[in-house]
Image: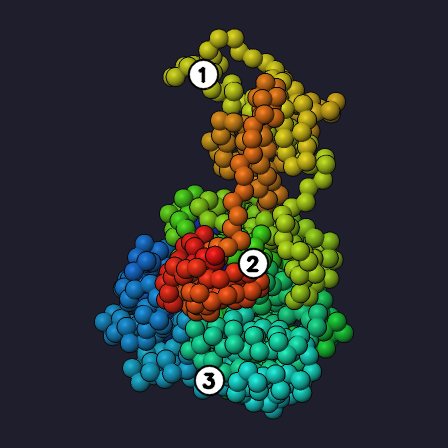
Amino acid sequence: MIFLRMTGVLTCKSFKAYVNLGISLTASARTSNLSLSCTQLRTVSTDLIYPGEVTFGKILIANRGEIACRVIRTAKKMGIKTVAVYSLPDYRAMHVKLADEAVCIGPASPRESYLNIESILKVVKDTRAEAIHPGYGFLSENGAFVTMLEEFGVTFIGPSAQAITFMGDKLQSKRLAKAAGVNTIPGFDGIIQDADHCVEVSRQVGYPVMIKASAGGGGKGMRIAQNDCDAREGYRISTEEATTSFGDGRMLVEKFIEKPRHIEIQVLADKHGNVIHLNERECSIQRRNQKIIEEAPSVFLDEKTRTSMGEQAVSLCKQICYSSAGTVEFLVDQNRNFYFLEMNTRLQVEHAITECITGVDLVHQMIRIAKGHPLQLKQENVSIHGCAIESRVYAEDPFRDFGHPSVGRLYQYMEPTHLNKVRCDSGMEEGSEISLYYDPMICKLVCYGSTRKEAIETSIKAMDLFVIRGVAHNIPLLRDVLTEENFLKGSISTDFLKVTYPEGYKGKQVSHCEKMKLSAIAASFFAHNDLRSRMFLNARVGQVKGEKPSSWSTVVKHCDLEVPVRVMKVDNAFEVEINGKIFTIRGDINLALPVLELVVNNEQCVVQLLSKDEVGKFSLIYQGTTFNVFVMTEVAARLSKFMLEKPKKDTSKIIASPLPGVIRAISCKVGETVVVGQKVCIVDAMKMQTALVAVAAGKVKSIHVKEGDVVNEKDILVELE
């Protein structure tokens, strides 16, 4: 009997078909949260798990967060025991709870824990794990680590050390790509020696150029230079970032392709010479060279270009005798000319959208390949079904340079997994902590649809229902991008955010009608709250103190609006009159709920109530953005005009940290005179460096920190006289 592994939801029709064919579900599939509905379809895996197929007895996951949880879940479906490793701050993390065993490997710093090869090898020995899955990041592309595992007799669930080394060096990988017949970007064929050399090479290649780390990836150690000054500064910052993140500060310089698309090809290769590609992913929506929204397939590629890109990706894999899952990344210009960017010899963050449109579990395939099994999939078996979009939900403030990291504890957290065609890959739950030491990702929100339009609509609905409290997050930006005209048309490039929001992201720009609607909703909340406050303690429903009001006269202040509003309670609804327009609001107005799904004038409307206070301030999340709406009685509104505004404090002589992080460098001394725009220090947070500059000229009065200090947001670092 064949056992079918399920990675998503089956339609009633397909489920009956599988039953009629005599196919049974594994116990793990039967007990997983899979609902069957005739109207829903996410993904049905084409992978088959055979009970008699030899696999590993126990694997160790050398990672943390959502990717560790992701690997553990597939391992459990395959009947494999799992070992988690964790740093001291992660002792209550979800991946620790999910694994069969968990071992602490060191303190918070990645260098002393998740990058500590000696500690991880000791855990391998103590737990007798047969294999290691590295996830992505950390040790996933460390050839020396793979070599050490081979000496230990432990299998690395990934490619060979040689393949990792070849592709991990961007200069060498570019040379190998050329040899394999892959299109490459023009640039300097060598390593940059210093800042002066960087300027010299940049002039030869021709501005604009991309300065990037030879090792690593993930957008770290990369800067665009438009002139000599940019080249010098870009070389310095990129070198520091690359050294911090990868332990390798070597730099390359290439021609910068303007307005490109970032499109990548997923590949699978076994140890028997079989190589296939699983089509493409569009990853052009980025901030600071890091992806935030990906989709599969790309709306831009035609079949000819898709086939050519896939063939070149397969050719490169064969050139280096690659085995395992991997991704070949390309830059594609407006004429569909494509150029090799790099190859990631690991599982990608965005692998889930490929799984959705192909039905292939990539983690399952990686484990099978590592065990030595040949691919059962042929290229002709791989097709595209529907569209999937992944939105990376990060703990960061999108109103500050599209995303300054935010740290803290999630005191309330609700994923929209109750929706059809929604998959949330995360390692978070209520009480989880976002640390400054690690990537600020909260969740990968993956939404599937039979069409791109459906996938976008599902993504928007999921974001409206996603509850995150305790840290800033980038859902406002993600949601706004999904509604932007050029995104809807598929007219995007890697500079999409800068072009769309040239002055930075300012939040959802609501129309006058939407402002009126929000005012009406807040006014109905005010009336509901007033009724509730009149209830006697432990009273029967409807029993109130004194006379029960049926109407309220208020004044609402919101954005540039200040309007008189009359609210009336009519049966099970509120009727709100603003400037002669009536808004009828129905639904369960329970202000204790984080999400309220209302009907306003017969239209569905979802709002989240962040907070309310005694002076009538309602903080509402509407279409992703937080709006503060003030609802006051007429008397309170009249008296508020006499309230004095608190004078603003002059902070021009104070340089404070804009985010939590570690002080990496201090570029000034006490008594030294600094000018406007001069860099005074560098803060490193979540592997990204932020240079802080003086906003006013003056003499340095005091420096409150030293290199290596951990600082919180708004901590004063430097004061000027």
Numbered disc 2: secondary structure: loop
Gap in Å between the C-alphas at discs 1 and 2? 54 Å
Query: Which quadrant of the figure contains the N terminus?
Result: bottom left
Q: Nearer the viewer, residue 355 or 211?
A: 211
Check residue 11 in the rendering and tell me which mark sits there, or answer none: none
Gap in Å between the C-alphas at discs 1 and 3? 70 Å
Q: Find disc 3 in the rendering and name its residue.
A: 165
Tell me which label, 1 or 2, sits earlier in the chain. Answer: 1
Q: Amino acid at mark 1?
A: Met
Q: Amino acid at mark 2?
A: Val
Up/down of 640 relative to 689, above or below: above
Residue 242 placement, left or right of 389: left
Frontmost of labels 1 and 2 is: 2
Q: Residues within 10 Å of mark 1 (few under 14, many from 20)?
A: some
Gap in Å between the C-alphas at discs 2 and 3? 44 Å
At horizontal 70% and vertical 73% (from top left) the residue drawn is: 258
Check residue 695 in the rendering and tell me which mark sits there, or answer none: 2
Check residue 535 in the rendering and tell me which mark sits there, or answer none: 1
